[in-house]
Image: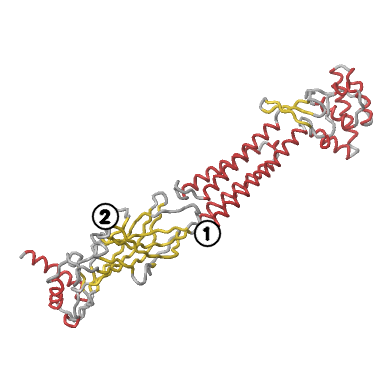
Amino acid sequence: MWADAGRWAKVALILDFILPALGDATESDFLRLYDKLLGNYTPHMRPLENQTSALTVTLQFDLISVSELNDAKQRVSALVLVSVQWYDKNLIWEPSEYGSIDRMYLNGNQIWAPKVYIQESATMDPKLFSLPTTHLALPTGNVTFASTGIIEAACRLNVVYFPYDYQSCSFVFGVLDSSRQDVLLEADSRGPQKSPSYVEDGEWQILAFETALKYSGIKDYETQTLKVTFTLQRRSTYYVLNVIVPAMSVSLLSLLTFAIPVDSGERLLFCLSILLSMSVYLTYIGCIMPSSSIEMPIILRYLVCLFLISSLCVIITVAVIIVRWSKVAVVNDQQKRIFILGIPITFRRRRSLFGVLHRCPKKTQQSGHSHNCNEILSVCSCQLQNFPESFSPNTSECPSSVEDLGNASSTFSRLHKSDLRRSVAEKMKCLRKSFKRNSKAKTKLSLEADIVGRDLDVTYICSRLDLGSFLVILFFYLVTTVHTFVQLNRGMHR
């Protein structure tokens, strides 16, 4: 008795929602139709005359939005609308006999309904939706179950061509406790498609849908599944403007390192600043790039190469600075020896570039050869390097020309050491005064004073190291960049 009371209470509740939309239908019309449809209905039996045949179930897939593509977990989740439809011979009536009632909403436990599930689901319950949705029955016998929800499944993502990659993800649907001989699952004639209320994703663009039927199991119990596949393309504009272009620009600044003079003192600081900027930027990039170690993205390998190029610029800069400030010893007129980190390295000079090797006065006097103006200036410059800053020469007779100073150089070795310093300083002072009247001679003297304390051969070696390093780094940069974008272009046109 109490069971019948609860049953009629549910019927009355359903009537409150349905009757206002049915027009002339009365409560008695609904109760008569309800008794006709469910009075002798058995929900555990398939609605077929021939129970040995298979019942066809049609599935319609509408995509509302792509919720997430997890690169690390290799999973995809989407908000979808799934509609399942089949024919039930026991749910047929004539609307005119029941007050023009042309539809009935029935619960899933009141009628036979296929238990559709998602294969490879990430949830504990593999059934399609846990939402208690009613089934719509029409007078023709067609029954429709439709519900909306977020479904999640495994998806193997290939991020090699990131951010110009294409991904294909699939949702596989099946029917629980039913074989192919019992239920045939088919796709709707329209096929899977985007819902009219589809929400565009900021990262992914839907390109196409496909369906396929798969069969598995043994001969007597062969199961059937429906595979819905959709292809997505990543929108690359964000990653190009925020990853590729800034990284290339920062790395390109490394080439400007070799344009800074090694004597300026700012070269190493500039190089280290670029390397630090690149390392900080790579940390930021790692947060927005796919985190997968199965297949490394080409663009990630490219960024690592750019970081290595910046590191190589720092190493070369340190090497050039070490060579520039290393000690140099004269071996003979054609060879010099440079000590790099205590390791002696002998190299041969090129006279065509810097002329005859300049010596100090003591060794020059022993050679017994005449000297030109440049050699005399070099002798004086060599002596002046060892002069104390507090030395103030006395006025003495001033040579009228460079030739007079050259003739006086033969007497340098016979003078006392202090007299020699005083004499050379006085004569150089007078010689500079006379050169003020001659602009060409003044330029030569300025150049000679500028190179005092510098070894021209070491400067030449450093300049050649800079030029060679610039060409090598530029070559690596261009080869790496061209190779990367050729590979990405192949991925775009797959």
Q: Image point 13% across, 75% down: which residue?
A: 36
Secondary structure, mark 2, is loop
Residue 387 in which image quadrant? top right
Counting residues from the start of the chain, the first of labels 1 and 2 encountered is 2
Using the image, determine if residue 405 lies above or below residue 486.
Answer: above
Using the image, determine if residue 7 lies above or below residue 355.
Answer: below
Relative placement, left or right, of 448 versus 478 is: right
Relative placement, left or right, of 339 versus 483 is: right
Q: Name the outermost residue toward the bottom.
A: 96
List the residue tagged with mark 1.
492
What x and y, as percent, mark residue 166? 47, 58
The image shows a total of numbered marks equal to 2
* Amino acid of disc 2: Asp
Q: Name the outermost residue toward the left.
A: 1
What x and y, as percent, mark residue 440? 88, 39
Quadrant the N terminus occupies: bottom left
* Amino acid of disc 1: Met
Residue 29: which numbered mark, if any?
none
